[in-house]
Amino acid sequence: MEPGELAPRPWPSVGSGSADGRGGWCAARFLLAISFLELVGFCGVQSNLIMYLTGHLGMSTAAAAASANAWTGTEMVLPLAGALIADSRLGRYRAVLVAGVLYLLSLGMLTVSSTLRAPEPRAASSPSFAQLAFFYVALYLLAVARGFHRPCAEALGADQFTPSDGEDPSSFASRSSYFNWFHFSLSCGYGLATTGLTYVEDNVSWTVGFGACWAMMVLYLAVFLLGTPTYRAERHVGDVRFVEAVRAWAARVFRRKDAAGTERLLAGEPEDGKGKGFVAKLLPIWATSLIFAAILAQVSTLFTKQGSTLDRLLGMGTGIVVPPAALQFFLSFSMVTTLPIYDRLFVPFARRVTGHHAGLTTLQRIGAGMATAGVAMVVAALVEARRLRVAREAGLVDKPDAALPMSLWWMLPQYVLLGVAIVLGEIGLQEFFYDQVPDALRSVGLALCMSIFGVGNYVSGMLVSATDWATRSTGESWFSDDLNRAHLDYFYWLLAGLAALEVALFLHLANRYVYRSKDEL
């Protein structure tokens, strides 16, 4: 090992804690555990939502996809509000407690709402206004709960590796590793939700499935409270420190004094003269990540509907039908497999080559994720083109409810590729936005990152709605309710083309970006 090189830090180590024994991996384990439990409970609803909307509530494919994208966009934008409240007044610890209470309330309401109307064919009567209102109140209350949990739990975990006397190389390495293991725990939770819970929802009942999600949140609160003695004390919030941080950030955006002492209104250079201010610097990265986010939105919407038309029998003679949302398990499996390889093998190797504490800079990691997502869309388009060809050859074009003689496993590669894209791109974005904002605004930084995926879902919804309108006016919609007459493959090619343009623009911006921390240079 070269002098000064950072040794890999294994996850089970307790290190990086404070002198009083708080913080470090000892505290982070509790936060990783609650993140796992939260994702099981949350994704038990989110991953199968489009099937609930089209089946239990009788919506059309296009309307359900737009509704699901709108809700997902909202739950990913709300962390901005949750983070601001936490960083200014509430504190991250108490924000996670609030999230737990809201989760219990919202999932309890969803469980009740699923009992108000028995499943009926689409042609049967629609649910009443009161039933729909109760459902949507519960659904959006679930989004509010996540608005508090997601930025604050993740930031609270990362805070366990920030020494009180400043940052050192070992804390950088541990914190970077924490982000990887955080997503490892999310992937495990996602895998359990998309296999176990979706199977229960599709084959037992929605009420039992939503009730299981509620039970996960009971455990979430219990584990979080159990870990309280191990958490590093938060810096005081709601005081002048936060206000000064915001003022300093705003000041960097609008003015600086040059060597002659004159003030110049700019897009905002910081006092050290190293590049533009935080807002001006982060906004281009934020904007050029939206297509990446829109691509990921297809996993729980169009991919799921696409899978519902294929042969989903698990083996010959078993009689077990795989829920279409269960393919999302392979997204998790891909992430669970890739993350340890990336963290334990690739990072130490790349560190020796590049000298960077994480092997790659965060922007290099993000760019690789965007490119992988574009490749996944190419693969998805080719698989969908084959599915349509099989439907024509089998004479099933006008039989949307018939299973095609094509295995569900043909869709496996696109899920695996998107899992790798998330490991590279989404985790890279979260680490980037955490590091590139002032210390007092790190929950806000993570919320800004999450808002990318929220707005990305809105972008996906708008693309679906606009394409549906444009293609319906000239003939058969690309999103026809009879997917055997639709053209999801054309839509996937559209996303692949947009991804290629996004990567080109992102590389241009990344090469010009000046990192806030000297450790990233």
Image: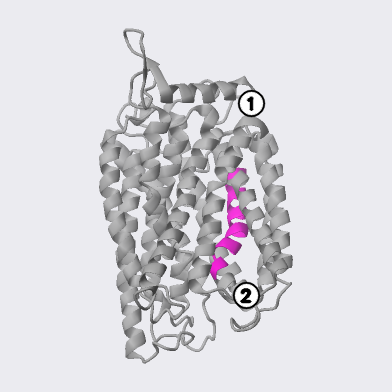
Location of residue 213 (image quadrant): bottom right
Location of residue 169 (image quadrant): top left
Residue that mark 2 sits on? 56
Q: Give the residue furthest to the front.
A: 473
Amino acid type indicated by mark 2: His
Q: Is residue 306 magenta?
A: no
> Which of the pair 470/336 is nearer the observer?
470
Q: Is residue 16 visible?
A: no
Q: Is residue 225 left or right of residue 416?
A: right
**What is the total number of numbered labels drawn onto the structure image?**
2
**Main SS of the magenta segment?**
helix
CA distance separating discs 1 and 2: 53 Å
Whichever of callouts 1 and 2 sits on the residue coming sooner in the sequence is 1
Q: Is residue 108 visible?
A: yes
Are discs 1 and 2 less than 8 Å apart at CB? Answer: no
Residue drawn at the location 31% of the way across and 42% of the way down: 364
Quadrant housing the N terminus: top left
Residue drawn at the location 35% of the way across and 10% of the way down: 262
**Residue 266 spot, x, y in % from top left:** 36, 24
Instruction: In the rendered view, tell whether residue 72 sits above or below residue 16.
Output: below
Q: Is residue 93 left or right of residue 316?
A: right
> Which of the pair 314/97 is nearer the observer?
97
Residue that mark 1 sits on? 20
Amino acid type indicated by mark 1: Asp
Q: Which residues are magenta?
A: 28-50
Instruction: In the rendered view, tell whether residue 4 sits above or below residue 420.
Output: above
Quadrant housing the C terminus: top left
